[in-house]
């Protein structure tokens, strides 16, 4: 029996690398993409295919997905992970920074979907999980670009689900709170009901569930994994 195949973007470190390790542990064949040589080191560790590239570059996304179909003949799942968009005071953020954020947090998913949907339709289904952020549900002035554009990503995810659920292609978002891939100070931790940052491993296990058959009836959702941080309904 052939293994399932997953593509993970921004997989060189942090949540992306944790997702790659978790999926490898669960028996997936992997294609990993990131800008730095860290992705090649991780790919060697996991027996995966590495592609150096940037999630904001359409050609790089195309090369990554083509590497998966060339090597394995199918793509069962995509984990669309990215870096962090620019920050700043709300009205001082430049147009260039807003456009960079758009490429980084929304258009990367749009572009991935355009490329992978024909593959998934042909094989009879698949799953996409977008790693977003808690600001999609509870906007923060500390992260204005992220909050606005990740809310748009949640809307796109719902639209995608409405359009492609009939084809067995699911899309969901994971909305991490404060995660230990970056330092979390005591003041910030005190705002989290669970009193601590989440771990990259906890995010990875949530992602692995959402792309698995155990989540086969879940699509179009934006799931907070934030220790109870978000109060919004």
Image: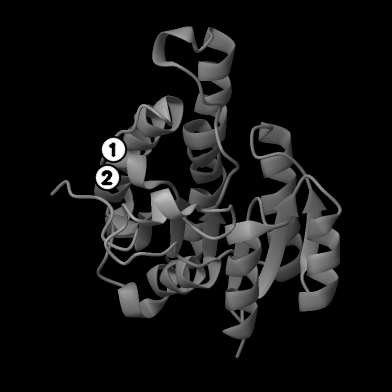
The residue furthest front is 186
Q: Please tell me which residue is depicted at 86% across the width and 53% down the height of the picture.
A: 37
Q: Secondary structure at mark 1?
A: helix
Q: Vertical placement of 135 versus 23: above or below?
A: above
Q: Is residue 74 visible?
A: no
Q: In the image, 144: left or right of 215? A: right
Q: Which residue is mark 1?
A: 155
Which of the 4 image quarters holds residue 170? Answer: bottom left
Q: As rendered, which of 206 and 221 lies closer to the eye?
A: 206
Q: Please tell me which residue is depicted at 27% across the width and 57% down the height of the picture.
A: 166
Give the image location of residue 7, x and y in percent.
62, 60
| Count of labels in the image | 2
Q: Residues within 10 Å of mark 2 (few under 14, many from 20)?
A: some
Quarter of the image that includes the N terminus = bottom right
Contact, CB < 8 Å: mark 2 with mark 1?
yes
Give the distance between the C-alpha atoms of the residues marked 2 and 1, in whole angstroms.
5 Å
Q: Which residue is mark 2?
A: 158
Give the image location of residue 99, x and y in percent.
54, 18
Q: In the image, 185: left or right of 66? A: left
Give the image location of residue 66, x and y in percent.
71, 52
Q: Is residue 175 visible?
A: yes
Give the image location of residue 33, x and y in percent.
72, 53
Q: Please tell me which residue is depicted at 45% across the width and 51% down the height of the picture.
A: 130
Q: Vertical placement of 196 versus 91: above or below?
A: below
Q: In the image, 126: left or right of 219? A: right
Number of the label disc, if any, that sits on residue 135: none
């Amino acid at each position: 029996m052939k293994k399932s195949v997953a593509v993970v973007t921004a997989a060189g470190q942090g949540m992306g690398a944790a997702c790659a390790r978790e999926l490898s542990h669960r028996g997936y064949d992997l294609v990993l993409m990131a800008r730095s040589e860290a992705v090649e080191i991780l790919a060697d560790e996991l027996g995966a295919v590495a592609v150096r590239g940037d999630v904001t570059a359409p050609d790089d996304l195309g090369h990554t997905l083509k590497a998966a179909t060339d090597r394995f003949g199918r793509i069962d799942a995509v984990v669309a992970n990215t870096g962090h968009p620019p920050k700043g005071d709300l009205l001082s953020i430049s147009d260039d920074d807003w456009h960079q954020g758009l490429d980084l947090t929304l258009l990367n998913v749009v572009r991935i979907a355009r490329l992978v949907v024909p593959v998934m339709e042909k094989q009879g289904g698949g799953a996409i999980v977008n790693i977003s952020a808690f600001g999609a549900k509870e906007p923060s002035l500390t992260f204005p670009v992220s909050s606005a554009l990740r809310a748009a990503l949640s809307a796109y995810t719902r639209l995608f689900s409405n359009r492609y659920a009939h084809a067995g292609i699911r899309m969901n978002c994971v909305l991490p709170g404060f995660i230990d891939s970056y330092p979390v100070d005591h003041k910030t931790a005190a705002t989290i009901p669970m009193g601590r940052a989440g771990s990259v491993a906890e995010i990875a296990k949530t992602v692995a569930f959402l792309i698995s058959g155990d989540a086969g009836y879940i699509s179009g959702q934006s799931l907070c994994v934030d220790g109870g941080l978000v109060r919004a309904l």
